[in-house]
Image: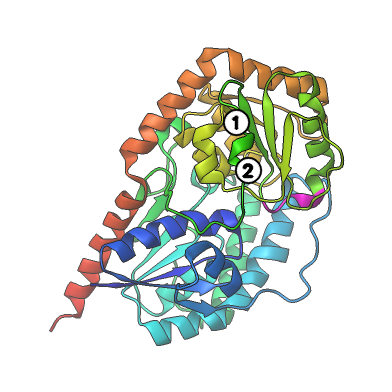
Amino acid sequence: MARFLFVVPPLVGHVNPAAGVAAELAARGHEVAWAGHEELLWQLAGPAALVFSCGVPAGAPERPAGLKGPAALRFLWEDFLVPLADAMAPGVDAAIDAFAPHVVVADQQALAGGLLAEARGLPWVTSATTSAELIDPLSGMPKVAEWVDALVDDLRARIADGRGSADPRFSPHGVLAFTTRELLGAAPLPPRVRLVGPALGSRPSTSDFPWEWLDPSRPTVLVSLGTANTDAGASFLATAAEAFAGMDARAVVVDPGEVLGAVPPNVLVRPRVPQLPLLPRVDAVLCHAGHNTVCEALWHGLPLVVAPIRDDQPIVAAQVVAAGAGIRLRFVRAGADRIAAAVEEVLTEPSYRRAAETVATSFHAAGGSAAAAGHLEQLALESLARLKP
């Protein structure tokens, strides 16, 4: 039996894949602990999860609307990733001391995990919950890459006494990437990347759902912009609901900010939905191209309409289109007519579903949580063997 410490940022889309892997490891008899935001972890990993609480940045600035390109990258690093690592570092240190893990699993956006694991001489694996970093978006921007390296070096000096040299986003011990070539494409990958496909585990239910509202005789579309886009998504959600007014299809719209008013009778609005149990009962997904939502939809062979907002979402949306599994819309300019036309096309043109099912086949074959757990077990065995006299 080995001990695994998962270090994750306070982001639902980053915790959920890790939770699937953690559950598989626990089912195999291993000990699992978490370092991160305790309330979110107890919600997503279960109330019995062993959680070592980590801080979050105080007074974090709100992301300005419409931020793109280099300005968006600067905000991500200077206002989110680096402050988060500084805030999490004491909690991660305490978790390593108290739990004594054999292996650390560090999310790509929880930089403190990789930096402190390396500084302590612990084997660690990167959890890459989106494919955006895997295709090296900075390859054509050497000055920006140097700036990022300098930020990481400064962070390493502050929280890890300058020990280590590895990029905390790409562990030399391995990178678990929750995708496959059928979605990712043929781009070259960093060394030791394991394409394990989505890690879908059971999740504690946080909402009731009126299952009787679903009508098997009519197509149903799930409309979701994830959990981090409430402010940006209000207008789009309203337009999407309007788009279904003249359609035979039904829509389940996830509205976490409860911003929608009156909607057509064929539209159901809920602040939260049990997404994994719901997906097998819908026919398509309209979303922001968040990696988790896209992969969960494609796991079920569902075609997509994607309207990326920011960050990695344009890259993921491009992968969906290149795979033939969906249609891309412009988030700020998609009117009700365009949304309706795109939804109608993915529902009626069989090529989109066939492409989605091809990706689904690759996902299932990749192994998901079981494959990821197997890689981690092997690393733990090697670590335990080194500890034996």
Q: Looking at this rendering, what residue extends furthest in the left direction?
A: 389
Q: Earlier in the sequence, mark 1 or mark 2?
A: 2
Main SS type for the magenta part?
loop
Residue 109 drawn at (x, y percent): 56, 61
Question: Based on the displayed image, in which of its 4 quarters is residue 218 positioned?
Answer: top right
Q: Nearer the viewer, residue 150 or 359?
A: 359
Residue 331 drawn at (x, y percent): 76, 34
264 part of magenta stretch: no
Q: At 60% from the left edge and 27% from the top edge, which residue is drawn?
A: 215
Q: In the rendered image of this protein, does residue 389 appear above or below residue 330?
A: below
Distance from Cα at disc 1 to Cα at disc 2: 34 Å
Q: Is 149 displayed left or right of 359 in the figure? A: right
230 part of magenta stretch: yes
Q: Which residue is mark 1?
A: 318
Q: Verify CB contact (< 8 Å) between mark 1 and mark 2.
A: no
Residue 94 drawn at (x, y percent): 48, 85
**Region in magenta:** 227-231
As helix, strand or loop, the secondary structure at mark 1 comes to helix
Foreground disc of the pair 1, 2? 2
Q: In the rendered image of this protein, does residue 4 appear above or below residue 355?
A: below
Q: Nearer the viewer, residue 302 or 142?
A: 302
Q: Nearer the viewer, residue 258 or 358?
A: 258
Q: Amino acid at mark 1?
A: Ala
Q: Amino acid at mark 2?
A: Pro
| Circle 1 residues within 10 Å: few <14, some 14–19, many ≥20 | some
As helix, strand or loop, the secondary structure at mark 2 comes to loop
Q: Is 195 displayed left or right of 224 in the figure? A: left
